[in-house]
Amino acid sequence: MAVKQKIKKPLHLAKLRIKKGDTVLILAGKDKGKEGTVSRAIPQMNKVIVEGLNTVKKHVKPRGQTQQGGIIEKAMPIHVSNVMLKCTECNTPTRVGIERREMGQDKKMRPVRVCKKCGKVIQDRTRSS
Ligand SMILES: [Zn+2]
């Protein structure tokens, strides 16, 4: 009997609350308790890559003369629930809320990330203000 295929939901592209350039605290895994900088955010997977953390050792075969063989350490994506954003204002790992505030020179209402601890707007390091 034919089974109706589940209709795939469109990829939920909700923006991550953690962005490139953020400092995060690792909450799980072998690098638990360490802090690092997000080098890439992957909203489709709800994951982020933290520079130099959550690494795996990869054996690489030499390819021709351009690539040397050996072991390289590669940072693996880590789920956003396993990291906590460090507030740029109070320097504490915190949960993040989204609020609309008047931002920029034109005072437009824009969604911004707000620290649940100190209530201040968390700076976005990828965007120059
Ligand atoms: Zn704060």
Image: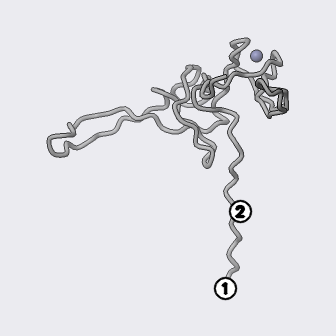
On the image, the x and y values in percent for residue 15 come to: 69, 42
Three-letter amino acid code at disc 2? Lys
* Image disc number at residue 2: 1
Q: Quadrant of ligand 1?
A: top right
Compared across the picture, whether 35 is left or right of 8 comes to left
| Residue beneath disc 2 | 9
Compared across the picture, whether 69 is left or right of 22 comes to left
Mark 2 lies on a secondary structure that is loop
What is the quadrant of residue 3 in the picture?
bottom right
On the image, the x and y values in percent for residue 73 come to: 37, 32
Residue sitting nearer the eye, 87 or 27: 87
Residue found farthest to the left: 65
Query: Does residue 122 lie above or below 8 as drawn?
Result: above
Compared across the picture, whether 100 is left or right of 12 comes to right
Give the residue drawn at x 70%, y 18%. Answer: 87
Crowdedness near tag 2: few (<14), some (14–19) or many (≥20) residues, C-alpha within 10 Å: few
Q: Which numbered disc, 2 or 1, marks the residue closer to the eye?
A: 2
Three-letter amino acid code at disc 1? Ala
Crowdedness near tag 1: few (<14), some (14–19) or many (≥20) residues, C-alpha within 10 Å: few
Mark 1 lies on a secondary structure that is loop
Give the residue drawn at x 45%, y 34%. Answer: 75
Comes first in the chain, label 2 or label 1:
1
How does the figure colour the protein chain or chains? one colour
On the image, the x and y values in percent for residue 5 come to: 68, 75
